[in-house]
Amino acid sequence: MIRGLALSPTMKNFIRCAGLSGILAICLGVYGAHIMKENTPDELRRLFQLAQTYHLLHTVALLALPLVSRPMITGCLFISGLTLFCGPIYYHAIRNDTQFRRVTPYGGIFLIAGWLSIAVL
């Protein structure tokens, strides 16, 4: 995992989760750049790029969990936020279907709370 750094099993799982999230982010990036239909409206492409940006940023943030004082809280908030914020935006951009967009604000709240947990806990 990380040589020379003793990590708890929980931290190792968060690092693995970050790795899987990174793989997913890169695969979705490849889809957006090379496979997404050329006739996809610019607004949907912009939404896809927004999800990509937040996905990659918070994947890297997951890698920093061993450095925060309450990694379980922060990690759960970030993972929940990634799922509820980026997931529905990706879905909307790929399928042009807004049925899951109503949960996006909750995902944003989880992401904000994750950063807040780093700042105050």
Image (spheres, grey):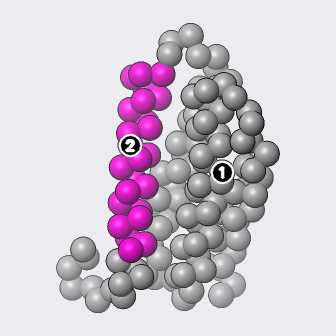
**Residue visible at 58% across and 38% down in the picture:** 90
The amino acid at mark 1 is Phe
Residue of label 2: 26
For mark 2, give the secondary structure: helix
Q: Is residue 69 left or right of residue 92?
A: left
In x, y percent, where is residue 64?
45, 73
**Residue visible at 47% across and 29% down in the picture:** 32
Tell whether position 42 is magenta.
no
For mark 1, give the secondary structure: helix
Q: Farthest front residue? A: 99
User: Can I make out residue 50 in this image?
Assistant: no
The kind of secondary structure the magenta stretch mainly shows is helix
User: Can I make out residue 31 in this image?
Assistant: yes
**Numbered mark located on residue 115 in the image:** none
**Residue visible at 48% across and 51% down in the picture:** 56
Q: Is residue 68 above or below residue 76?
A: below
Tell whether position 23 is magenta.
yes
In x, y percent, where is residue 40?
59, 16
Q: Which residues are magenta?
A: 13-36
Indicate the quadrant containing the N terminus: top left, top right, bottom left or bottom right.
bottom left
Give the image quarter of residue 76. Answer: bottom right
Indicate the quadrant containing the C terminus: top left, top right, bottom left or bottom right.
bottom right
Q: Is residue 67 above or below residue 27?
A: below
In x, y percent, where is residue 120?
69, 84
**Numbered mark located on residue 85 in the image:** 1
The amino acid at mark 2 is Ile
In x, y percent, where is residue 71?
52, 82
Q: Rate crowding at label 2 as few (under 14), some (14 to 19) or many (20 or more) other CA atoms within 10 Å.
A: some
